[in-house]
Amino acid sequence: MSNGDDDPADASEGADAADDAEEASGAGESTDAAAAPTLPDEATEESLNEYLDEIEAHLDDAETEADLDDVDALLDDAEEGVAEADLPEPDEDDEDADDPRGDLEDRIAELRDGVEEARGPYAEDVIEAIEAAESTLEDTEWTAEGRDDAADAVDVFVEEASESVAVDADPAHDDLDELAAALDAVAEAVADAGLDPDDDAETIAALLDATDALEAGLDDAEEWDDLETHEQLRAQGYYDVLGHYKDFPVEWAALKEHETRGNVDQILLALDSLQSDFMERHCLEAFERMGKRGKTEASVEELLGRAEKRDRPSIRILGKMAAEEATETLVEFVSEDSNPQLQKTVFKALGEIGAAEAVQPLANQLDPEGDTEDLVRPHAARALGLIGDTRAIDPLTDALADDDSDDVRAAAGWALRQIGTREALEAVAEYGDERSFIVSTEAEKADRALDESAPTA
């Protein structure tokens, strides 16, 4: 303790001496530098674990991105130390054997994960979240109520974001394109703000909170896929044709009314939405009864897709619709001799369509030497009659004259009558004395047709 009589010069000398001692001991270094761990010269498992303990403490104390960069550099040193250390190798034959090197490498990997988790948040995280929300807004099929809720979520977000960055956006509430553009404007404003993860941490955090709320709002908004099937149908007016729900199931009752009114789109909606064999059958039957009245681009596309899978009801309906668009697909099925039921349906459909492209393929099916069954060939003849192309006269005349099956011959006679030219009618009329009743009947009808067409005196 000083008595007050000390010489100032002595005091000064004492202070200098203290400074010299502090400098000699290295006390002039920063606290962080003094506290930084040092990789042991001769690394062992124990010393390396101690080194990692110190790095973990540094990670816990890190407050800035620079601090985290320092921890990353220390982990680089640790990784190198583990690679160079002379550590015992595990016994390959013992699955439970200790693996010091592997354990140390795992610990370094965990610490690196900790560094990444401690970084940020960054402005880039905000921009990424906004872009994800913008994609959700544009790509989602919203219900009317969900669209309104999604717009509310965007409006709130733009307002909150404007408190943190300079945003120039005032989107119309009912315009999804403008709402999406507003989100894009916020993302650009965040990018232009040059936010620093350390200096502007609070601003970035506030923006992330706002994007979290935006995401939650969009998640809560009602999407079309959230609705049950009957809700989807109700939303699209499927049940509006019903004044009551007396008939059950109501979907069938509505279907019958839509058929009466010719509401093709609603029948297609039911066919697509109501996944039951019962409703599928009745939807297809409705189209079959409607015939040409049910033909639209959408209905033909739906039925043609089914026909390509050899669905006979759909093929039959395409014939009733006289859907020329189906010709190419159906002609491919003409020669499928292994499936006679399919052939019968296809032949009739092509006849009802009046597909001139099918004349030769169908004529080929009349050949008695071919693979087409006797029960199928009459259907080929009748299809040619429905098409009415004069190119079919010769093959039909040959079938009438030479086929061993009276059914085929009678069908050929009927087809020639449908073609109706004098040549075709005369080819049939000459079989009036035919032993086969069904063939002679066709001949008599052809003969009467010729008489009716003859000029009167």
Image (cartoon, rainbow, N blue to C red):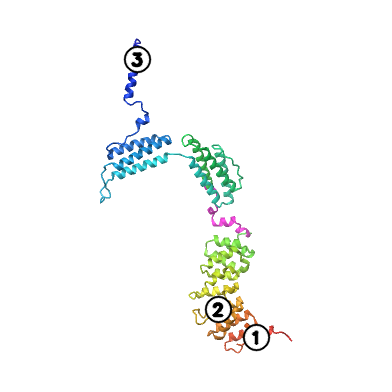
Residue at label 1? 447
Report how many numbered discs are placed on residues in the image.
Answer: 3
How far is disc 2 from disc 3 in space, using C-alphas?
128 Å
Q: Is 436 above or below relative to 273?
A: below
Residue at label 2? 363
- Dot 1 amino acid type: Asp
How far is disc 1 from disc 3 in space, using C-alphas?
148 Å
Magenta part of the protein: which range?
219-242
Badge 2: residue crowd in 10 Å (few <14, some 14–19, many ≥20): many
Q: Which mark is residue 203?
A: none
- Dot 2 amino acid type: Ala
Residue at the farthest right position: 457
Residue at label 3? 11
Viewport quadrant of the C terminus: bottom right
* 82 horizontally vs 287: left or right: left
Badge 1: residue crowd in 10 Å (few <14, some 14–19, many ≥20): many
* 382 horizontally vs 19: left or right: right
Q: Nearer the viewer, residue 210 or 29?
A: 29
Residue at x 52% of width, y 46% of height: 131
Magenta stretch: residue 358 in it?
no
Q: Secondary structure at mark 1?
A: helix
Magenta stretch: residue 224 in it?
yes
